[in-house]
Amino acid sequence: MSQYADLLYEVSGHVATITLNRPERLNAISGPMLSSISQVFRDADADRDVRVIILTGAGRGFCAGLDLKDLTAGGGIGGGNGAGLPARFDLAGSPPMVLHSTDKPVICALNGAAAGYGLDIALGCDMRIASTKGKLAAIPAKRGILPESGGTWLLPRLIGWAKASELVFKGKVLNAEESLEWGLVNAVVEPDELMAVAREWAEEIAANAPLAVQATKRMMRLGLEETFEANVHHVYLQLLPLFATEDFKEGVKSFIEKRPAKFEGR
């Protein structure tokens, strides 16, 4: 039995694959899944053997969002205190926050529809490769809520204020090709090619120096909130320890010897 509720987790060749595994509910997220998703990302980020993470869904959907059926029945996200809301919700440990702070690159293999919370999780990944059956459903306003798990922060940064406003205020649903046109996915492939292409991208990233890739992601993340001058200084301070790594020596040596580098993450 998996240690993660309703998730599948596999590590192979420096690539971790996380699969949301409630296909009968279009991978809608139950209460137990929230803590499991956070934990699996923490574990993957801490595993030195993992260099890239792929996130996907089982069945025909990526993630339908929070499980509203469980919620209204009192057994889901907010059940148990009579008010329909949790007495305390650990936002710092919630999946969007943990995903945002993950240093390993994360590729979303968008196999089907991502709606609500599922949309925010997909947008929180670094890259998105969509199946032709993939969809991004920005529909919270049609349910009387808002993109509560990072969408309001992510969307204006990904596609600009005007396009983000159009998407969420109208409650639009974008198919895979439209998502590509809007700049919300990196590529669109046939369904039977999705995981192979995601794996190919992951392995290409994993072949690079992992410490350098992770440092680059951290600096890009900080750069979203910093001035140019502050980021330049932070990048310089991050560069100094990289000069002392075995991977830096291997990178220089492989360049001189005109051969592929073999990085060890040290």
Image (spheres, helix red, strand yellow):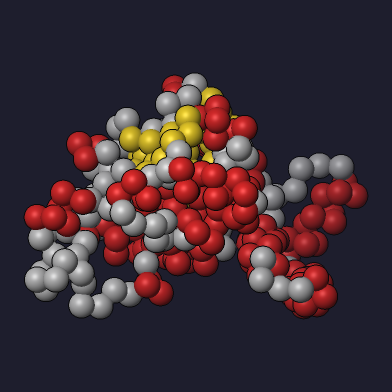
Whole-percent x and y of residue 217? Answer: 65, 61
Q: Nearer the viewer, residue 147 or 11?
A: 147
Query: Is 89 rendered above or below residue 63?
Result: below
Q: Residue at x 48, y 34 (%)?
A: 174
> Residue 40 appears at what percent x and percent y?
37, 59
Residue 196, image x, y percentages: 51, 30
Q: Is residue 133 left or right of residue 70?
A: right
Residue at the spot 47% in from the left edge and 48% down from the top edge: 169
- The residue that appears at 57% across and 38% down in the rendered structure is 185
Q: Quadrant of residue 78?
A: bottom left
Let me know if residue 253 appears in the view: yes
Looking at the rendered structure, the number of numbered marks drawn on it comes to 0
Q: Is residue 54 visible?
A: no
Up/down of 17 relative to 60, above or below: below
Q: What quarter of the picture does the C terminus occupy? A: bottom right
* Residue ID at (73%, 65%): 246
Residue in the foreground of this view, choosing between 255 and 4 = 4
Question: In terms of depth relative to the viewer, which is nearer, 186 or 141?
Answer: 141
Rendered image quadrant of residue 115: top left
Position of residue 210 in the picture relative to residue 38 (left or right): right
Residue 224's x, y, as percent? 67, 66
- Along the line of sight, which residue is nearer the eye, 173 or 43? 173
Residue 157 lies left or right of residue 34; in this view the side is right
